[in-house]
Image (spheres, rainbow, N blue to C red):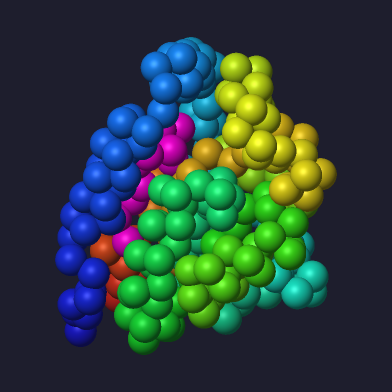
Amino acid sequence: MSLQSTLRPGTLTKLLQETLANSITQFPPEALEVIQAADEELKERKVGEHALKVGDSLPDAILSDASGKSVSLSALNEAGPLVITFYRGGWCPYCNLELKAYQEILGEITNLGGQLVAISPEKPDNSLSTTEKNALTFPVLTDTGNRFAKAVGIAFELPIGLQKLFSGFGMDLEELNADTGWALPVPATFVVDGSGEVVLADVDPDYTRRLEPSDALAALESCIVTSA
């Protein structure tokens, strides 16, 4: 039976576009130049090009939840399909919008027998803050050292220009994150069936763009129907 998502298709994209338009008016021209140059550098480096693709098997990982407890992804996957979203951190407004959008369809994911997890390099204390700030009721996990992001093929070093810009804004990723230095994951969403096979992979180095949660929900429903 098809489930109608409570989040209308295109809703997240619209919010992201509005946030981008507003941020462009807030940043000084020199900051925008740094951001644009960094975007071009990441394109040239082909960041995310070797990420997991549909048909690949999800590697296992031991992550930490917001309380510091270890969580095995393979153990979660044994209980059913997973929707996994990688975000940069609670400091990123685009990530917060995405996390809230997934919270809105959490009931649909659960009703389909799936589980939703969000992963970032944030220290557990900061993941807890992100959870509380966005009123999230699904696991928000810490990927220490970006080890899982590296295994998935989406970890990258932030361009030097952005490192300096972030530092100028008082945002020290080396302090916020768990042993990652200035490395981040490319924002990405994977839907994995009960056997650990990737059935949807969305990876985009442009951090202002995200997969619509309704698309992840449709992929989850499809793999449930296929396995029935």
- Quarter of the picture holding the C terminus: bottom left
Q: Position of residue 166 (x, y in %)?
A: 61, 31
- Tell me: 186 left or right of 125: left
Position above or below: 62 against 145: below
Q: Position of residue 127 (x, y in %)?
A: 65, 63
Residue at 65%, 18% in the rendered image:
160
Position above or below: 28 against 192: above
Residue at 37%, 33% in the rendered image:
26
Residue 24, picture quadrant = top left
Residue at 58%, 64% in the rendered image:
130
Front-lying residue, 130 or 47: 130
Query: Is residue 37 among the parts visible in the rendering?
Result: yes
Residue 210 counted in the magenta span: yes
- Quarter of the picture holding the N terminus: bottom left
- Tell me: 129 left or right of 192: right
Give the residues drawn in magenta, as a range.
203-213
Query: Is residue 151 among the parts visible in the rendering?
Result: no
- Tell me: 84 left or right of 171: left
Residue at 50%, 74% in the rendered image:
136
Residue 99, picture quadrant = bottom left
Front-lying residue, 16 or 212: 16
Residue 3 counted in the magenta span: no
Q: Position of residue 11 (x, y in %)?
A: 21, 58
Decide whether the magenta segment is chiefly helix, strand or loop: loop
